[in-house]
């Protein structure tokens, strides 16, 4: 994403706005995790690598916070997440 918000707030149903905001937050955190881990893999500077991986880990926590709140607001998301988990377990046993 890198600084571009893929969301047009004018066209969002107000009752779904919070869920959309949380999903955008999750997307942003995933982008940040990928960026910091890729940068860490690129650098040869050990100190920079340590810092980048530490920041990536913090972004994973942020993603978890957004996801936890989203699951409180969107029961269908909870059901589909569980269905996906079950499907993976069945196909990877």
Image (cartoon, rainbow, N blue to C red):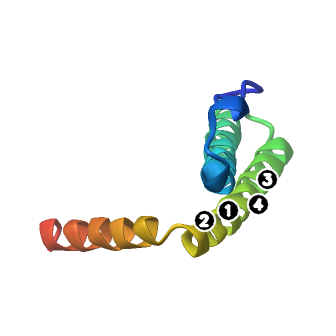
Front residue of 16/51: it is: 16
Helix, strand or loop for disc 1: helix
- Estimate the spatial distance between the alpha carbons at disc 2 and disc 1, rounded to whole Å: 6 Å
Helix, strand or loop for disc 3: helix
Q: Which mark is residue 37?
A: none
Sequence-wise, the earlier of marks 1 and 4 is: 4
- On-image quarter of the C terminus: bottom left
- Estimate the spatial distance between the alpha carbons at disc 1 and disc 4, rounded to whole Å: 13 Å
Sequence-wise, the earlier of marks 2 and 3 is: 3
- Estimate the spatial distance between the alpha carbons at disc 2 and disc 4, rounded to whole Å: 19 Å
Residue marked by disc 4: 58
Circle 3 residues within 10 Å: few <14, some 14–19, many ≥20 = some
Assess whether mark 1 and mark 2 are in contact (beta carbons under 8 angstroms). Answer: yes
Q: Is residue 5 above or below residue 77?
A: above
Assess whether mark 4 and mark 3 are in contact (beta carbons under 8 angstroms). Answer: yes
Circle 4 residues within 10 Å: few <14, some 14–19, many ≥20 = some
Query: In the figure, is residue 89 to the left or right of 77?
Result: left
Helix, strand or loop for disc 4: helix
- Estimate the spatial distance between the alpha carbons at disc 1 and disc 3, rounded to whole Å: 17 Å
Helix, strand or loop for disc 2: helix
x 69%, y 55%: residue: 18
Q: Quadrant of residue 48?
A: top right
x 64%, y 28%: residue: 6
Sequence-wise, the earlier of marks 2 and 4 is: 4
x 76%, y 60%: residue: 58
Query: In the figure, is residue 45 to the left or right of 81?
Result: right
Residue marked by disc 2: 70
Residue marked by disc 3: 55
Assess whether mark 3 and mark 1 are in contact (beta carbons under 8 angstroms). Answer: no
């Amino acid at each position: 994403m890198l600084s571009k918000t893929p969301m047009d707030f004018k066209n969002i149903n107000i009752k779904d706005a919070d869920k959309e905001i949380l999903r955008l937050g999750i997307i942003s955190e995933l982008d940040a995790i990928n960026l910091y881990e890729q940068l860490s893999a690129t650098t040869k500077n050990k100190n920079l690598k340590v810092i980048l991986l530490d920041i990536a880990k913090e972004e994973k926590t942020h993603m978890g916070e957004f996801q936890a709140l989203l699951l409180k607001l969107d029961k269908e998301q909870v059901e589909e997440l569980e269905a996906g988990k079950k499907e993976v377990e069945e196909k990877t046993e």
